[in-house]
Image (cartoon, helix red, strand yellow):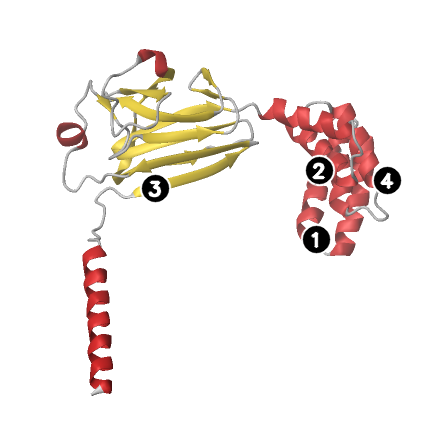
């Protein structure tokens, strides 16, 4: 009898647990316009785009989804947002670091893209506030040969100082130019590091940046020399960078001699890539 009572209590508790689970379960269905998060570092700026991606599903983009001459939420569901952790120049307008909603006025030959200071809207704001528009740029439509089924935002033409934010859907392609303050940020970082106790790597990175940006070449040469001096046995790619800096300064004879040293070291290290690069540079500077 005692065992029977215990069994009944156990069954009762299990039944209650199953009922509890059943009443708290939620229906899960797939989203027709799934959310996407795209992150990209360009130069010294972090960019993130959050948006929902609608698909055509047999519809015509202009006739059935995006009527021309009307503002659009730039995706599906909640408004699309873009964030920058530094100041940028968006389509010709300076924009402070922060997060912004993106909207578009759709046209056949051009779209007007707007950054809006207010990101908590479901679609378009109920009351459009012109004072919250932080940037607006007109982007000519480029035709895609291949049909893009799903609305896509991506990053292309990446450079340390700029990139294109590319929007594609159906046969429409919109490259939005965004310029970055990389030179100012990198220069400030170098100047701050040089006031402290820079390491050999700090000197090398500073020299490398100045070389690639083709600025402050005298300082670049000073820094690469200090970096090499701080190594017991500086690697061949350090020596090559010194050769490149000398070449950029027009000091070709010194560049050739330095490149020959890097070439010798690269052969000893078995680096075919740097053997080829040094040989090409020596040939170039010898003309």
Residue at the outermost top position? 131
In the rendered structure, which disc, 3 or 4, sits on the residue that comes first in sequence?
3
Q: Is residue 268 visible?
A: yes
Residue at 67% x, 31% y: name it. 209
Q: From what the image shows, is residue 273 above or below residue 132?
A: below
In the rendered structure, which disc, 1 or 2, sits on the residue that comes first in sequence?
1
For numbered disc 1, what is the local secondary structure? Answer: loop
Relative to 70, is 95 on the left or the right? right
In terms of depth relative to the viewer, which is nearer, 197 or 2?
A: 2
Q: Which residue is mark 1?
A: 271
Q: How many marks?
A: 4
In the rendered structure, which disc, 1 or 3, sits on the residue that comes first in sequence?
3
Q: Which residue is mark 3?
A: 36
Residue at 46% x, 24% y: name it. 178
| Gap between marks 2 and 3 measured at Cα | 45 Å
| Gap between marks 2 and 4 measured at Cα | 24 Å
Residue at the outermost bottom position? 1
Q: Is residue 158 visible?
A: no
Q: Nearer the viewer, mark 1 or mark 4?
A: 4
């Amino acid at each position: 009898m005692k065992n029977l009572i215990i069994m009944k209590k156990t069954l009762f508790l299990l039944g209650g647990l199953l009922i509890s689970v059943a009443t708290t379960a939620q229906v899960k269905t797939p989203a027709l316009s799934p959310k996407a998060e795209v992150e990209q570092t360009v130069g010294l700026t972090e960019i993130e785009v959050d948006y929902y991606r609608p698909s055509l599903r047999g519809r015509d983009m202009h006739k059935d989804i995006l009527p021309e001459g009307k503002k659009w939420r730039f995706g599906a569901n909640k408004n699309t947002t873009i964030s920058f952790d530094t100041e940028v120049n968006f389509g010709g307008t300076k924009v402070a670091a922060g997060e912004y909603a993106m909207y578009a006025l759709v046209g056949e030959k051009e779209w007007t893209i707007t950054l809006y200071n207010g990101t908590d809207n479901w679609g378009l704001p109920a009351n459009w506030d012109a004072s919250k528009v932080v940037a607006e740029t007109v982007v000519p439509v480029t035709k895609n040969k291949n049909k893009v089924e799903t609305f896509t935002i991506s990053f292309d033409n990446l450079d340390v100082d700029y990139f294109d934010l590319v929007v594609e859907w159906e046969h429409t392609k919109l490259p939005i130019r965004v310029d970055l303050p990389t030179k100012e940020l990198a220069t400030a970082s170098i100047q701050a590091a040089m006031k402290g106790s820079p390491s050999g790597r700090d000197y090398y990175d500073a020299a490398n940046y100045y070389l690639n940006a083709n600025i402050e070449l005298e300082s670049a040469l000073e820094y690469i020399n200090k970096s090499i001096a701080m190594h017991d046995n500086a690697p061949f790619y350090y020596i090559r960078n010194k050769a490149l800096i000398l070449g950029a300064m027009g000091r070709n004879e010194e560049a050739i001699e330095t490149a020959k040293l890097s070439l010798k070291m690269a052969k000893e290290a078995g680096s075919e890539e740097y053997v080829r690069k040094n040989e090409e540079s020596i040939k170039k500077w010898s003309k």
